[in-house]
Amino acid sequence: MEYKIQNIVFPIETKHQDCKGLFYHGDGCLDREEKALHLGKGQNIDFTTYLNGCSCRKWKKYTKAKRFSLYLDAEGVLQVCLTGYTKDIQINRTEDQIKKYYLDSRQVIHLQFSNSEEQIIGFEISAIEDSVIYGGYYTVEADESELNEIRLCLATTTYKKEKFIKKNLECLKQEIINSESEIRDNLYIHVVDNGRTLSSKDVCGEHIYLHPNSNSGGSGGYARGMIESLNQTPKATHVLLMDDDVLVLPESVFRTFRLLRLMKEEYKTHFISGAMLYYEEPNRQHEDIGTVTKDAVYETLKPRFDHNYLEANLDNEADFAEKNSQYAAWWYCCIPAEVIEKNGLPLPLFIRWDDSEYSSRCKAKFITMNGICIWHMGFTKKYNSVLDLYQQCRNFLIGRASSNVFQETDPYNRIFKAFRVEMLKFNYDGAELVLRAFQDFLKGPEFLKANRGEEIIKRNSKLNEKLIPLNQVEGCDIQDVWSCFSDPPRKFLDKWLFRLTYNGQRFWPTALCKKDVAYISFDYAYQPQKMSMHNKLIAINPFDNTGNIRRLDKVRYRKLSRRFKQATAYYEKHKKEIETAYREAMPYLTSEKFWREYLGI
């Protein structure tokens, strides 16, 4: 039988007009209402792109797909050239076949690829006379009796982001739920509403279910989505976790479903990890697989490819060396139900580290593919010290202790470095958040059993740095706000004074500190030379032209240092018993019984 694996998609969404190169390259005029691409005489279009090329090598590796074909819905006088690309040292292009068509009315034409050994196959169209392309799709040959039975549940958790969730649901309804494809009867959508601001009339419909939930963060929302998916009738075979504040292309869900239907037995427990493309720069990839480094920080496995370019598309589909502690982020991650049943639900971490801990706990293997993606805001603009200091530090320690993951990392070193950096930047509230993270971890697993994540976030939010417009910041006269990210080479004397005096906070008279202002970044950046031996820093957010003065405070430095030393001493004395307690509690903390009680289901 012939089996459709992916559709040709056009940039219909307004946002997609900013990244047309992901869809096609060349001439033509897109009629967004008609959803058709008009080509004038002599115009050319290349569809071998990130979204419309076909990753045939991966389809052949992971699935039972054989013999690829292309169907085009078109009219006019046109020439179609089937192409294929691989990359070793350079890009290699092949032309499979070239055919001319004289279509005096709208028709569907069929072309079969004779060679499918390339990484990516695609096609080019040249208009001999005025022509119109209405769409098309790729198919493969497959044995109908070998297709897997799939019931895909999309679980998305939301907190007061009604605009995003409604828009995404409407797209999925129009493109999938209301379609005549087999996926419509095998896709179920569970909307977990942590903010309890949605009503059934907002989101419910055929195969779409709303679950008002206590605000238990992303981990609680996704745990609820997993529970509902595994207990629905018919039971899910796979759970697709997806963020609420994203721009989704329904075609990504369609391709995910087709991958699952054709999946070979040896890959059935793999996660399908969708790429995150930047909402602000929609042609650029942030990540499709991440890793946790030995320093316990997130790192993308691949470069931040610009998918306007064919070379980036090919490089993205190449085999990348596996590293320890790889993970699939939960902005778009499809997990087999049997993996959830075997390994349990997420830890109750509220937000941050839940996805990386889960992937590592499951010892997950991953499938990625060009065109399976979402668009999400970049994280630099979303920096929040409560989430990026307290939640990150605490949850890393809890995840490592509970699941025996990230064992190549030094847990204390992660906390010590985070605390030290904030102290050196005179961000004493940030240092307080790191200290609280450490202290709360030391309380052991009993601390996690009460659903008070929202309460903790609210308490800690009082320590979020308050940035104000730069024209209201005393003494701020920076000319280039983006220069706040720079840091000049370190000078020998400044380097050793900085270290010895903890940036002037000990053994050093304040009167001897530099009197001019140093402009530094508001976020993760560590800029020792720029900060060195000043008594006043101005932290700047260049994305919205805001900032805040940070002043050297020796009294607060001493108080925080003393408390951190006390916590360290307790950790060194009780480390083994604390980690053992987390490890013993983990099976219960990730069980359905625990989560039902925790969420009040």
Image (cartoon, grey):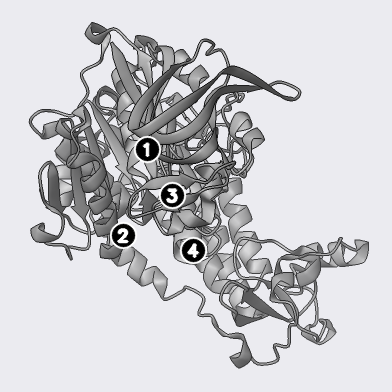
- Mark 4 neighbour density, 10 Å: few (under 14) some (14–19) many (20 or more): few
Q: Residue at x 38, y 54 (%)?
A: 32
Q: Earlier in the sequence, mark 2 or mark 4?
A: 2
Give the vertical position of 43 relative to 419 (above or below). Answer: above
Mark 4 residue type: Lys
Horizontal relation, residue 16 to residue 293: left or right: left
Residue placed under numbered mark 4 in the picture? 382
Q: Earlier in the sequence, mark 4 or mark 3?
A: 3
Q: How many marks?
A: 4
- Mark 2 neighbour density, 10 Å: few (under 14) some (14–19) many (20 or more): some
Residue placed under numbered mark 2 in the picture? 164
Give the foreground label among 2 and 1: 1
Give the foreground label among 2 and 3: 3
What is the distance, in whole Å, between disc 2 and disc 3 at their CAs?
19 Å
Q: Earlier in the sequence, mark 1 or mark 4?
A: 1
Confirm or deny contact between disc 2 and disc 1 (CB under 8 A): no
Residue 11 bears which disc, if any? Answer: 3
What is the distance, in whole Å, between disc 4 and disc 3 at their CAs?
27 Å
Q: Quadrant of residue 535?
A: bottom right
Give the foreground label among 3 and 1: 3
Residue nearer the viewer, 218 or 233: 233
Residue nearer the viewer, 263 or 551: 263
Residue placed under numbered mark 1 in the picture? 252
- Mark 3 neighbour density, 10 Å: few (under 14) some (14–19) many (20 or more): some
Q: Earlier in the sequence, mark 2 or mark 3?
A: 3
Give the foreground label among 1 and 4: 1
Give the foreground label among 4 and 3: 3
